[in-house]
Structure formats: C-alpha cells, structure tokens
Image (cartoon, rainbow, N blue to C red):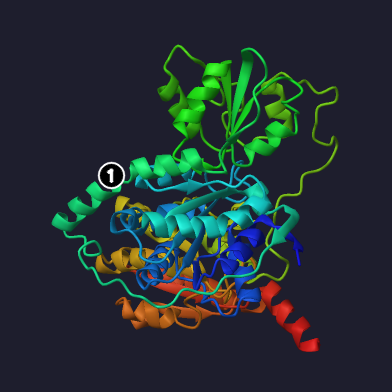
C-alpha cells in the first residue's frame, strides 16, 4: 500500500535516512538542520541519535560508524561545515566502509546565520559527490541513492539543502524501510592511517575516481533536460536544486526555454555542452553562491554568453525567488510582490523572565563604571543582548570567539575585557579558548550564562550541563575564581558585587549565572500536568 506523508524537507531527509537503514545520526543543533535529528530521535528509537558536542565530533563519530560497516548520517548547518572541515576533507582521503552521508543545510539570506556560505564548495574541494534535492519527495528518494552511491564509490556523499526546502512541507510518498547493515569493521588499515605514504596513495585513488563521479552524474536521473524546442533557442537554463522550482513556476516551456535540471555533482559536462549547442545563451539559477556559474563559464569559454548572479541578472546575494528568476527569464509581473506598508518591525527579543536578561542588567551596570569596558559576545539566544534594551555586547563572530577575542583584546591592553558565552557554545568551542587564557594568565572575566539547555534551537540537551565548574577546574582555573550565581532581580546586588570582584582580579575568572531556560521549564511543567 502506498503511504503519503506531509513532511518538512528536514523530515523527509530524516525519514529517507531511516528507511535507508541508517544505524546512527550525529549532529549539533543548528537552524535549518535541527529538525532532521529531532525527527529521527522522535520516530526511530533503533537509530543511535544523541546530540554531539560540536560538528567535528559528530563528523568523526559518523565516520567511525562507517568504518564499522554501518550506514551513518551526520547533519549540520552550513557554518558547522567549517567546524567539521578537518574530519570532512580527510574522510574523502580515507574513504568509507559503510555508507556515509553528510547533510549540510545552507541559509541563503541569512535568516538565522552569520554568513551566506555555500556548502557545495566543500564538496567540490573534497572531490566527493554532491546531491542537491529540488523538493521534499526528491530529498526523501535521494537518501537510499546517496548511501548506495557512497558504498559503491567508497566515499562520503555530501547532500546540500537550503532553508526554504528544509522548512517547507509537501506530500511525500514513502516506501518500506530497509534493514540496518550488519557490523563489519574495516580490516585494511592502510587507507585509514593517514601517514604521508598512505595519504599520498589514498589521494591518488581519490583523484582516480573523479571519472567515475562524473560518469555517475552524467547518468543520474536527478540530472535531466526538458525537451528541446525546434531551432536554436535564445535562452536556456541550468537550474540547480531548489532553483529548479523557481524556474518551472515561470513556465519556461511556454517561452520555448529548454531547462537542464542539476541535482547531482560534479556537473554533467556533456549535458551542459549539449544544452549550450541548442541555445544562444544560458541562465544559471542556483540558490547560493555562483559555483555553477563560474564552472560553466570555464567549461564553455569566454565567448559564450552566461547570465546569472555574477552578471547581475540574478541578485548577487540572498535567496532566489520565483519573481527574480522570472525577471531574469524575461517574464515581468503585472503586480510584483512588495513588502507590506506601515507595518512596524518586531525584532526578536529575549523572553520575559529569561535569566540572560538579569545577566545583561548586571553587566551593563558594572561595565558603566569602567570607561574602557568591552563585552565580547557569542552565538546563542543571548546574542540578542546586542539589541535594545540592553545593547550589551560589542562583538559576535563565531562559536566560541567570545573568550579568545576577549583574551586578544586583553593582550592588547583593553580593561576590563569580558566574555559572555552560553553553556552549549562553551562546550562546543569555548573550552579550548579558556585553556589558552588560563595558560597565559590573561586578565579576562568569562561569563558562562547557563540556562541548562541549547535554547536557541529549541531546547536540545547541552553537553556540559552540571559539569561547568568541574570543566573549569580541570582546565586549571583557580577554584577561588569560579563563581556561581542565580540570575534573578532579587540577587542583583550579589551578582554585581561578584562581577566587580572578578574584574578587579588580575587573571582569568569565570562566573556562571545558572537558571533554567523559561521555555524548557514551561514545557516541563506542561508535561507534568498531562
């Protein structure tokens, strides 16, 4: 019997992976990828699925499962690829035993991110296959294909999605699940021990597989061309991933515009050349950076007319839309979409009753007493302390940067130099920075604002819960300068006093304001009533 489910793109990927027989999913929560792991945790108890400390540990654990001969999925948002890059790139050199799929969820237009990077560059850099579904059904169907491809080529496979696909729903036809693979650990050590002699041999093998990757892409059902019109068309389109939907919404068939859909990489060169022969020019519709546009320019030569993001025919930054793709196709809208007028923007804010609010109230009060005070922030819901009414932090760059930036500023002479970091971010990327500061006896004050969860992405487990004092002491911090407070208005006098004391201490100190996130607390109370 055919089953149809209404699924988010993330959920389609999750269910596709479960039905492909994965034994483990490894991830650190990050929008827009979080719901993949959450769905597996809620619907597939047979799959190992605990949250990891960061994306690098997730990638390495997934690689370990693939070493053992079982299928594994590792999920992250695009900036997590930067954290996982060492293990990710080297996994292409070691190769895999069981199938391994790396899911990267990109965020064009930066809905909840610091940058707009395109994870396809990582796949090209690592020289592994890349899959880019155009819709939820394809996302589901691609998962078993991805694992079969991974096991056939003995390489990890990168699957790249974007926010609009991850967080939109569609009906998906699902199939019967496959059984998990049997345990069969790797027996050949030579390609897993990356001593230079082995690594050179493995790299040569990877380079030698590029012909197979191209042949697979050329033959892939996920790369297909619409029927050609009679005669030479003025314009053809190469539509990548979700960009294919925006192209098709503008009815290119009625305009006599042939379309080559690309959802598997490396690029199908023969198909692109054949399309170019049929058209006077090509438009490249890709959601993200102009990766394909640059490659097609190189493939077809400087004399062939290519249009896309680099030429200004599509916007250089932000998401594709049916409107801007339509304009590039020459389809003008009688009533183009415009934002609603006279609507007051409502920027995000910290929840009422949030402990971070009390932390920033105390910090602002004390920092105002020092002319040169600087507060270095980090990635989490407490980043909202940069906005009114607090305007409390002076920087927010990447996971864990608060501590090391505070150290560098202190090294330069800034006083007081204060870092604010959340509990999950501290274990993700802050511990090594704190160790640097302790080893150098940097004159900084670190606030680990502990709300007992990974709050920004929905309340997932935080790796260091109830361990932060022990971690700080284990890194070598003076026990006298590890202070714990409860961030409540009634404790403001105590909190501000402790902050002043630790600022005046010439060395590294850590203050841990600890109070549970209001959202997770309310959720627990509601569940108790049921």
Instruction: Say left or right for 88 vs 350.
Output: left
| Callout 1 crowding tier (Cα within 10 Å): few <14, some 14–19, many ≥20 | few
Farthest residue, direction left: 197
Q: Which x, y percent locates residue 458?
A: 65, 67
Question: Which quadrant would the N terminus be assigned to in this image?
Answer: bottom right
User: Where residue 349 sits in the image (x, y, percent)?
Assistant: 69, 57
User: Is the residue 502 above or below the residue 286 in the image?
Assistant: below
Q: Quadrant of residue 436?
A: bottom left
Report whether 203 appears left or right of 143: left
Residue shown at 53% from the left, 47% from the top: 114
Residue 422 visible in the shown view: no
Q: In percent of the image, x 17 and y 60: which residue is there? A: 195
Q: From this viewpoint, is residue 326 visible?
A: yes
Quadrant for the C terminus, please: bottom right
* Residue 225 pos. (x, y %): 60, 32
Q: In which quarter of the image is residue 17?
A: bottom right
Count of numbered circles in the view: 1
Residue at (14% x, 55% y) in the render: 197
Q: Mark 1 points at which residue?
A: 208
Q: In this view, does 235 lie to the left or right of 102?
A: right
Q: Looking at this view, is 518 or 62 the one in front?
A: 62
Q: What element carries label 1?
A: helix
Task: Please give the name of the residue rendered at 65% of the width and 75% of the height, measured from the top-left corner.
Answer: 42
Q: Where is residue 334 in the image (x, y as percent from the top left)?
A: 85, 22
């Amino acid at each position: 019997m055919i089953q149809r489910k209404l699924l988010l793109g993330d959920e389609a990927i999750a269910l596709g992976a479960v039905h492909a027989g994965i034994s483990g999913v490894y991830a650190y929560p990050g929008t827009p990828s979080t719901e993949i792991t959450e769905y597996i945790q809620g619907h597939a108890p047979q799959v190992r699925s605990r949250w990891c400390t960061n994306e690098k540990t997730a990638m390495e654990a997934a690689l370990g499962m693939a070493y053992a001969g079982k299928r594994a999925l590792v999920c992250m948002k695009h900036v997590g690829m930067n954290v996982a890059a060492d293990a990710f790139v080297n996994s292409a050199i070691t190769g895999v035993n069981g199938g391994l799929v790396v899911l990267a969820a990109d965020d064009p237009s930066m809905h909840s991110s610091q940058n707009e990077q395109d994870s396809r560059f990582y796949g090209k850099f690592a020289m592994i296959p890349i899959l880019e579904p155009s819709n939820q059904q394809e996302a589901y169907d691609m998962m078993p294909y991805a694992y079969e491809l991974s096991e056939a080529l003995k390489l990890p496979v990168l699957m790249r999605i974007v926010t609009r696909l991850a967080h939109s729903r569609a009906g998906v036809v699902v199939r019967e699940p496959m059984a998990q693979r049997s345990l069969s650990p790797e027996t050949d050590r030579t390609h897993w021990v990356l001593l230079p002699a082995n690594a050179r041999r493995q790299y040569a093998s990877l380079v030698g597989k590029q012909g197979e990757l191209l042949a697979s892409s050329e033959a892939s059902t996920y790369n297909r061309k619409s029927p050609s019109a009679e005669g030479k068309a003025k314009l053809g389109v190469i539509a990548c991933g979700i960009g294919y939907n925006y192209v098709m919404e503008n009815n290119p068939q009625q305009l006599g515009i042939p379309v080559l859909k690309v959802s598997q990489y490396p690029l199908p060169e023969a198909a692109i050349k054949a399309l170019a022969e049929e058209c006077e020019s090509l438009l490249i519709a890709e959601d993200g950076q102009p990766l394909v546009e640059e490659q097609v320019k190189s493939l077809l030569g400087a004399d062939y007319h290519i249009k896309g993001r680099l030429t200004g025919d599509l916007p250089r930054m932000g998401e594709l839309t049916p409107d801007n793709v339509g304009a590039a196709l020459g389809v003008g809208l009688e009533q183009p979409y415009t934002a609603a007028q006279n609507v007051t923007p409502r920027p995000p804010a910290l929840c009422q009753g949030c402990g971070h609010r009390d932390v920033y109230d105390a910090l602002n009060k004390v920092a105002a007493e020092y002319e040169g005070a600087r507060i270095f922030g980090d990635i989490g819901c407490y980043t909202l302390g940069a906005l009114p009414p607090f305007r409390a932090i002076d920087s927010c760059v990447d996971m864990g940067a608060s501590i090391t930036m505070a150290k560098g500023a202190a090294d330069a002479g800034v006083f007081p130099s204060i870092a604010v970091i959340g509990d999950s971010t501290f274990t993700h990327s802050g511990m090594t920075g704190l160790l640097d500061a302790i080893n150098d006896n940097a004159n900084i004050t670190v606030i680990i604002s502990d709300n007992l969860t990974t709050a920004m992405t929905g309340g997932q487990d935080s790796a260091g819960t109830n361990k932060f004092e022990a971690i700080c002491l284990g890194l070598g911090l003076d026990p006298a300068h590890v202070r714990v407070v409860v961030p409540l208005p009634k404790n403001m006098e105590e909190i501000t006093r402790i902050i002043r004391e630790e600022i005046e201490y010439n060395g590294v100190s850590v203050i841990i304001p600890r109070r549970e996130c209001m959202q997770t607390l309310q959720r627990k109370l509601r569940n108790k009533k049921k």
